[in-house]
Image (cartoon, rainbow, N blue to C red):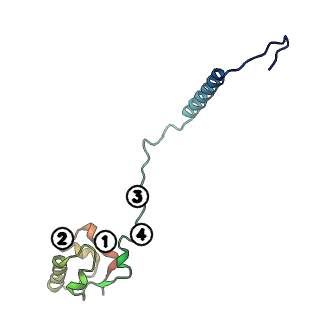
Amino acid sequence: MQRKNGARWKIGYGTVGFLALVLTAALIWYGVASAPPEVPASIRFTPAPVLNPYPELEGLVVRINTASEEELTQLPGIGPARAKAIREYISRFGRIHTPEQLLEIEGIGEQTLENLRPFLAFD
């Protein structure tokens, strides 16, 4: 730029940097000043749902009341001891009508039950 008397204005990198700093500070201050008073303290991320944790068991359905111990061991989390306990429970107390009844069997907890649910049939 040139002034009327012929002198030139020089804007150096320091001046440009200073102006950028002042502008950035003003934008930050304005953003902080106009922020809503209730800003969440943290953001929580939930893991993506796993659609099928056992793809190798796709299509498996075990009829819990009539299945043999060998068929029961195909289920996730059910080994020979738990399969035997399930058969003994059925012979002692009769048919299982709901998945929640499996919680009465020693060694089967909430997590195991959730893993079994998609593969069970009660008839």
SS category of the residue bearing label 1: helix
- Who's the residue at 48% across and 40% down the image? 39
From mark 3 to mark 4, how far is it between C-alphas?
A: 12 Å
* Disc sitting over residue 92 in the figure: none
Asked if residue 119 is positioned above or below residue 36 in the image, the reply reads below
**Which picture quadrant has residue 64?**
bottom left
Q: Position of residue 7 (x, y in %)?
A: 80, 12
Between marks 2 and 4 in the image, the one whose residue lies nearer the viewer: 4
Three-letter amino acid code at disc 3?
Answer: Pro
Nearer-N-terminus badge (3/1): 3
Q: Amino acid at mark 1?
A: Asn
What SS does tag 2 mark?
loop
Residue position for label 3: 47
Which kind of residue does numbered mark 4 sit on? Leu
Structural crowding at the residue carrying mark 2, measured as other residues with C-alpha within 10 Å and reported as few (<14), some (14–19) or many (≥20) = few
Q: Which residue is mark 2?
A: 107
Comparing 16 with 80, the one in front is 16
What residue sits right under mark 1 in the picture? 115
Q: Is residue 10 above or below residue 111?
A: above
Tell me whether circle 1 and circle 2 mark residues in contact (CB < 8 Å). Answer: no
**Residue bearing the label numbered 4:** 51
- Front-lying residue, 67 or 34: 67
Q: Is residue 51 left or right of residue 6?
A: left
User: On the image, which quarter does residue 86 sit in?
Assistant: bottom left
Query: Dot 3: what SS?
Result: loop
Real-space Cα separation, disc 2 to disc 4, in angstroms: 25 Å
- Answer whether labels 3 and 2 touch (C-beta < 8 Å): no
- Of the image marks 3 and 2, the number of the one nearer the N terminus: 3
The residue located at (18%, 70%) in the rendering is 107
Which SS class for mark 4? Answer: loop
Residue 45 image offset from top left, x and y in percent: 42, 52
- Pick whichever of labels 4 and 1 is earlier in the sequence: 4
